[in-house]
Image: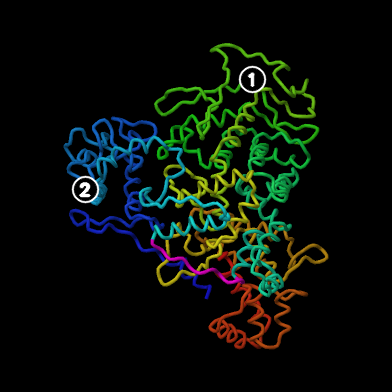
Amino acid sequence: MWLYSSILTSITLSAIYLAADLPGGAQLPPADPSPTSSPKQSVWNSHIEPIFNQHCFKCHGGVKQKGGLDLRTMDAILKGGERGPAVTAGDPEKSFLYKFLQAGSDPHMPPDDNKQLAADQILIIQSWIQKLAPLSATTVAKLGQKLGDLHDSNHSTIPASDRVKWVPPAGLSPSQAIDEFIRLGWSERHVEATEICDDRTFVRRVYLDLAGRIPTLQETKSFVKQRSRDRRAMLVDALLAGQDYPRRMREVFDVVLMERLGEDSIDRRQSNQWFDFLETSFRANRPWDQVVRGIILARPTSPAERGAVWFLYERKDNFQAMAEAVAPIAFGMQVKCAQCHNHPLVQEIEQKHYWGLVAAFNRSKTVNTSEGPGLMESAIGGFVSFTNLKKESQPALLSFPNGKIIQEERPADGAKEEDNPENYIVPPAKDKATAAKPATPKFSRREQLANAATRDNPLLARAFVNRIWALLLGRGFVHPVDEMDSKHPASHPELLEWLADDFERSGYDVKRLIRNIVLTRVYQLDSRPRGESIPPVEAFACGLEKPLSAEALYRSLLIATGNKADAEGKIAGHEEKRIRQAFVTQFPDLFPIEYNASLQQALFLSNNPILDDVVKPLPGNLAEQLLDLSEPKSRVRQAFMAVFGRKPDAEERKRAVKFLTDRENQPEAAVKQLLWALLTGAEFQVNH
């Protein structure tokens, strides 16, 4: 039964321990339960790095690296500092990192008496060093070169020496190439993949992913009856060409680009054409680099592009919010941690990048023009400095996370800049008059950022490919999806690189990318693992269960129950807008790092009048249709087909029929309770 999902989510995963007890009889605390390809990496993530983060990174991290020692990564530790390697693998007593933690050592670390490590933390470090395999001299020599290439995409959960290098041969379709990359990953991880899912599972899965809703009962029946070998490809093409697809993508990327800010923000985005801009872009398959360029530049050249302005306009001259919103989309990374100092854990994200992005926007200002909301940009000013934790002041240059630096003439200290119309393509309006168009300077910082983000920037394609893979497969190659940095290695670096390159060469063709992924074998794998062992999620060896977005959940609920708007535009007595907002409030997450159902969600599904009303018998809806059937067995079959798109299995049929039979004197209440149980169960709540 599909209902195994609810059992799995309630089981606490077993903790990972080191193979042997710690010295002195101490035990290592449970490791991070998230699956990894290496127990050593799990111990580092769960125990060692948190200790260093708490006690050591201030002096041996992003801001300072005293003695030339950086403790943020395993590679940096093994490379060491001025004294040489900080760790001698397998021998704590010869490792400076361990020796300097001992009482009476000279030097003693940490030097601050108030920040000393606890005894059990020192024991954990000792045991960790003991279990490290000694490295060859050749490997140690290569570490320096490896550390210098922080923008390389090939950070991986599998060591490079263990990965199979493969180049797709000519004539192989993109979907076949993706499958071969994934198959090689199964071989490297020694896992066995599940079989292809059946047609009923596929049609539900692909409708939810591409249309943002479950299929109707008729749509499912029509697909299952087809006998064409290409029926799955034909369905994918029909969905990509349909009207549900652009709405689905708008709902997803509205959250990705703008976040959920409440009902009022939805109304403003609607009235200011933001939704129209997104839907039109995805319907027309506008190249993704052009979409990104449009929202950064905010200078529409046609009515269809007017809504792009709202991306920056809604942030109301908050230049830091603008910078933080652009970084994950254009460069695939979060830069918030670099506001006050270089990122403490990710060497390639520096404070200068944060303030470089801020500088790209700080000459801009929201204005109202005769054409609607706009962003003017000044030709002068905006020269600011930032201060790091060392109290050192540095000018904020146009320096971006992909390594690009834009040269800009700066005024001498104390010099006063003079502005004049010759500095502009579109000069500012005079005497506070309403301008026809926002002021546009000849040298535009926003335009320089738009160029840096969309031209010769492989991070743009990589970030989008990773997010689409996560949307369709349940998890990105890099997880979390917007932290594509050296701390978060890719599960399949070669495939990520190949897909990003293919996406860029295709002209950033979004529909083509989605079609190529959806028609792979890996996308179509059954979500029920073989045997009792569950393969690691990053192997993509079985379909991953994906919690439905709020929009997909409420829309699927209405389709399953057969409720439609009445003459007053209400559904089961409620305005559709109110139904949607109720679900958005309770199910706000999209691309969650780790999905956990909340108590509030459980209470909503149990007690909210919306749920009670949609399962009531109303003209033409599912509850009324079930009551029109005379046999409990027929009612159960029809309910399962409408809600799940499948027949009940023998055990489900037996229990459900008994439930209805025991309440035959209360048929309406029994039908309502049966529908409630199906709609609030794990099988309906996830895309599997």
Q: Which residue is disc 2 drawn over? A: 90
Q: CA distance from mark 1 to mark 2?
A: 59 Å
Magenta span contains residue 227 = no
Task: Establish if 195 lies above or below 241.
Answer: below
Question: Which amino acid type corresponds to the residue marked 2 in the rendered image?
Answer: Gly
Give the image location of residue 183, x and y in percent: 46, 59
Is residue 609 visible to the viewer in this orientation of the structure? no
Q: Which residues are magenta?
A: 190-200
Q: Residues within 10 Å of mark 1 (few under 14, many from 20)?
A: some
Principal secondary structure, stretch drawn in magenta: loop
Q: Which residue is disc 1 drawn over? A: 380
Task: Establish if 163 lies above or below 434.
Answer: below
Circle 1 or circle 2, nearest the eye = 2
Q: Residue at x 53, y 73 (%)?
A: 2
Task: Establish if 676 lies above or below 316.
Answer: below
Give the image location of residue 444, x and y in percent: 65, 26
Asked whether 464 or 128 is in front, the reply is: 464
Left or right: 204 in relation to 76: right
Asked whether 410 or 270 is in front, the reply is: 410
Give the image location of residue 576, x and y in percent: 73, 60
Is residue 229 visible to the viewer in this orientation of the structure? yes
